[in-house]
C-alpha cells in the first residue's frame, strides 16, 4: 500500500509542469489613470488588495487615487495630492502640501494646519508623517485613528516614513541617517541606513550608500541586497508585513523582488506570466501578503507600449493553489518515506 502511495505521488510530481516548481509568476493588472491623466504610479497596497497612488497630468499636477478590484480607481485627496499609504480603508498622503487622511465615510480630512505629509498608516489607523515648521525645518509625528496628534519629536529635521501594526515607526533624520522609534523608549539611531518601510517583525527595508539593504532592528544587523546586473544604484522601497519579501528599484533594470530567506534577487519583469509579455515593471513600491500565504501582491509602476501606469502584480489563484498542493505532496512524500524507513528497521 505504501509503495502504491509513493508511486502515485511520484507520477503526479512527474506530470506537473516544470514551471510549477519555479518561483511564482505574477500577472499584471493595469490600474490605468484618472480621467485626463498621462501617467500613474501605485505607492501602497494592503492585504485586502486596496491600492493607492497618484495620477500625473500634462501640467505636472497630481491627483491621489484609491483603487479596489470592485470599484476601480477613485480620486481622493483633493487638488495636487498624492497618496502614500493604505490600510483597511484608510488612505493617507499629502494634499496641497498638507497631510491628509481619506476614508469612504469621512472623505478627505486634513490632519494638520501646518504643511507636511502623511507617509504611512497601520491596521489600527495610526498615521506617521511630518510637520513643516519652517521652509527648512520639520518634525516627525503621528496621528491616532481619531486624527489626534501625538509624538511630536523636539529634534528638528526628522521625517516619519513607515509605521507597523505594533505602532513602531522608522524615519529619516536630516536626509542622511535613519532612526527607529517604538513609541516608548528613546529614539534609536540606525546610522547611515535610510529606511523606507517596516514590517511587523521589525525588519526595515531601505538603503545604505545608495544600495538596497534591509535591517533587522532587533539585532542591529544590516544586510546589503545589492543591484540587478549592470546597475550601480538601488533602493528597497517596500517590505511585506511578515518581513520575508522586499521590493524596490534598481536604477537601470527596474523593479526587483528580494527573498530574505533565500537571499535571491530577481527582476520583477522576469517574473511576469508569459501572457503579459510586453510589460516591463519599472519599480516595485510596496508589497503585501495575500490571503494565500504562498503568494504576495506588489504595487508599483509598469511600462507598456510607451505608457507608464500604476500596476498591481498578483499570483493567479490557480497558481497559488498549485503551489500549496505541491507543498502538501512534498510533505506527504517525506512522511511516507520516513514511515517506510521505520517499517524496514
Image (cartoon, rainbow, N blue to C red):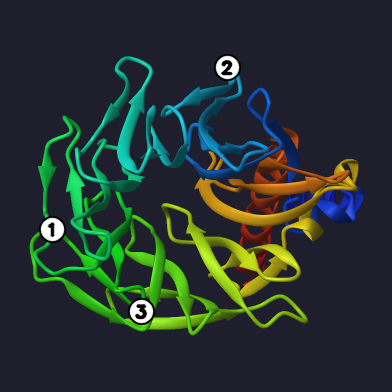
Say which of 206 and 215 sits in front.
206
Tell me which residue sits at (19%, 75%) in the image. 188
Query: How far apart, in angstroms, are the residues tagged by discs 3 and 2?
Result: 40 Å
Circle 1 crowding by C-alpha within 10 Å: few under 14, some 14–19, many from 20: some
Where 6 sits versus 48, above or below?
A: below
Mark 1 against mark 3, which lies toward the viewer? 3
Where 262 sits versus 200, above or below?
A: below
Say which of 195 and 14 sits in front.
195
Q: Earlier in the sequence, mark 1 or mark 2?
A: 2
Asked which secondary structure carries label 2, the reply is loop
Q: Position of residue 323 (x, y in %)?
A: 70, 47
Query: How far apart, in angstroms, are the residues tagged by discs 1 and 3?
Result: 22 Å
Where 260 sits versus 244, above or below?
A: below
Q: Which residue is mark 2?
A: 71
Tell me which residue sits at (18%, 56%) in the image. 133
| Mark number displayed over residue 195 | none
Q: Which residue is mark 3?
A: 176
| Mark number displayed over residue 183 | 1
Label 1 with label 2: CB-CB less than 8 Å: no
Asked which secondary structure carries label 1, the reply is loop
Q: Earlier in the sequence, mark 1 or mark 3?
A: 3
Amino acid at each position: 500500500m505504501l509503495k502504491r502511495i509513493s508511486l502515485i505521488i511520484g507520477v503526479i510530481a512527474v506530470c506537473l509542469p516544470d514551471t510549477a516548481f519555479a518561483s511564482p509568476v505574477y500577472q499584471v493588472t493595469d490600474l490605468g489613470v484618472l480621467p485626463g491623466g498621462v501617467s500613474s504610479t501605485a505607492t501602497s497596497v494592503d492585504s485586502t488588495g486596496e491600492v493607492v497612488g497618484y495620477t500625473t497630468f500634462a501640467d505636472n499636477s497630481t491627483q491621489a487615487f484609491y483603487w479596489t478590484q470592485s470599484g476601480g480607481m477613485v480620486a481622493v485627496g483633493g487638488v495636487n495630492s498624492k497618496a502614500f499609504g493604505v490600510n483597511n480603508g484608510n488612505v493617507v498622503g499629502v494634499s496641497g502640501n498638507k497631510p491628509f487622511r481619506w476614508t469612504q465615510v469621512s472623505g478627505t480630512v486634513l490632519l494638520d494646519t501646518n504643511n507636511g505629509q502623511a507617509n504611512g498608516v497601520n491596521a489600527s489607523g495610526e498615521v506617521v508623517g511630518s510637520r513643516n515648521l519652517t521652509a527648512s525645518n520639520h518634525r516627525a509625528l503621528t496621528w491616532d485613528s481619531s486624527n489626534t496628534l501625538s509624538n511630536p519629536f523636539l529634534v528638528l529635521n526628522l521625517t516619519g516614513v513607515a509605521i507597523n501594526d505594533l505602532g513602531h515607526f522608522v524615519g529619516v533624520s536630516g536626509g542622511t541617517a535613519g532612526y527607529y522609534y517604538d513609541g516608548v523608549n528613546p529614539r534609536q539611531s540606525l546610522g547611515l541606513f535610510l529606511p523606507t518601510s517596516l514590517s511587523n517583525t521589525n525588519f526595515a527595508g531601505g538603503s545604505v550608500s545608495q544600495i538596497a539593504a534591509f535591517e533587522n532592528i532587533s539585532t542591529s544587523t544590516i544586510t546589503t541586497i545589492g543591484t540587478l546586473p549592470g546597475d550601480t544604484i538601488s533602493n528597497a522601497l517596500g517590505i511585506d508585513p511578515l518581513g520575508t519579501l522586499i521590493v524596490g528599484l534598481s536604477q537601470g533594470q527596474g523593479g526587483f523582488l528580494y527573498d530574505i530567506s533565500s537571499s535571491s534577487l530577481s527582476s520583477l519583469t522576469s517574473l511576469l506570466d508569459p501572457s503579459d509579455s510586453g510589460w516591463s515593471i519599472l519599480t516595485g513600491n510596496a508589497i503585501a501578503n495575500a490571503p494565500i500565504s504562498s503568494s504576495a501582491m506588489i504595487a508599483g509602476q509598469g511600462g507598456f507600449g510607451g505608457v507608464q501606469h500604476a500596476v498591481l502584480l498578483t499570483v493567479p489563484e490557480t497558481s497559488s493553489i498549485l503551489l500549496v498542493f505541491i507543498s502538501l505532496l512534498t510533505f506527504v512524500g517525506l512522511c511516507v518515506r520516513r514511515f517506510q524507513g521505520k517499517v524496514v528497521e
